[in-house]
Image: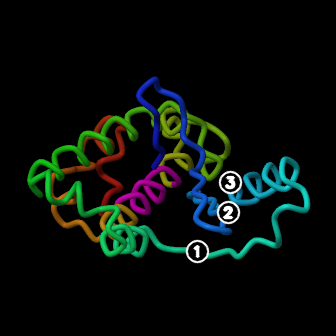
Amino acid sequence: MSTTLDDGGLVLGTLELKGHQLRLQVNSKTRAEQGTAVLRNALGSLIGSPLTQIMTAEQALEEQRTSGRGDVLEDEIPLEEEAEILAAVFEQHYRRVLDEVVPGLGHVTPRQAVKTAAGKKKVAAWLKQIEATTAGLGREEAGASFSFDWMWEELGIKGLRK
């Protein structure tokens, strides 16, 4: 998943300064390495060696809930509405992804990959992985509100879903 600002700009990570600790939070190892390099270049000896922590999406959501940062949203947005919002975000994201190059598909878009038999198999495996990952977010409400059926159909590989 990716996060965008109101103006459409891509959020690559967040920085939080708490006391003497600077926290860089990103969603991939590559972004962590890039962010650390940028900070080291900008701050030099003012920062020490990074402490790295890797979390699953479920762990990150739970940390957000228990740290108090998620309380405001959960108090203000009913679960059903939150599920609708998440489903809309998922759909917007995945509609865009169908036309973006995916390294795991041979550096072509999913729409390009399904033009060959081998590509169809790769796309089917990719979609199954996306579904499994999304189901593992720990939010049954979001999973129940979002269906990947349209992706299988739009890519013409519904028969490979098994």
Secondary structure mostly taken by the magenta-highlighted segment of the chain: helix
* Helix, strand or loop under label 3: helix
Magenta segment? 122-131
Dot 1 corresponds to which residue? 54
From the image, tell me which residue sits under label 2: 29
* Three-letter residue code for mark 3: Arg
**In front here: 116 or 65?**
65
Q: Amino acid at mark 2?
A: Lys
Which is more N-terminal, label 1 or label 3? 3
Is the C-beta separation of discs 1 and 2 under 8 Å?
yes
Q: Quadrant of residue 18?
A: bottom right
- Residue 149 appears left or right of 25: left
Along the polypeptide, which appears first: circle 1 or circle 2?
2
Residue 160: image location, x then y, percent = 35, 55
Q: Residue at x 56, y 36 (%)?
A: 109
- Residue 69, horizontal then vertical, whole percent: 35, 62
Residue at left offset 26%, top offset 48%: 86
Quadrant of res 138: bottom left
Q: Nearer the viewer, residue 124 or 137?
A: 137
Foreground residue among 72 and 134:
72
Residue 117 point in image, percent of width and height: 52, 46
Task: Say which residue appears at 68% left-offset and 74% top-offset.
Answer: 52
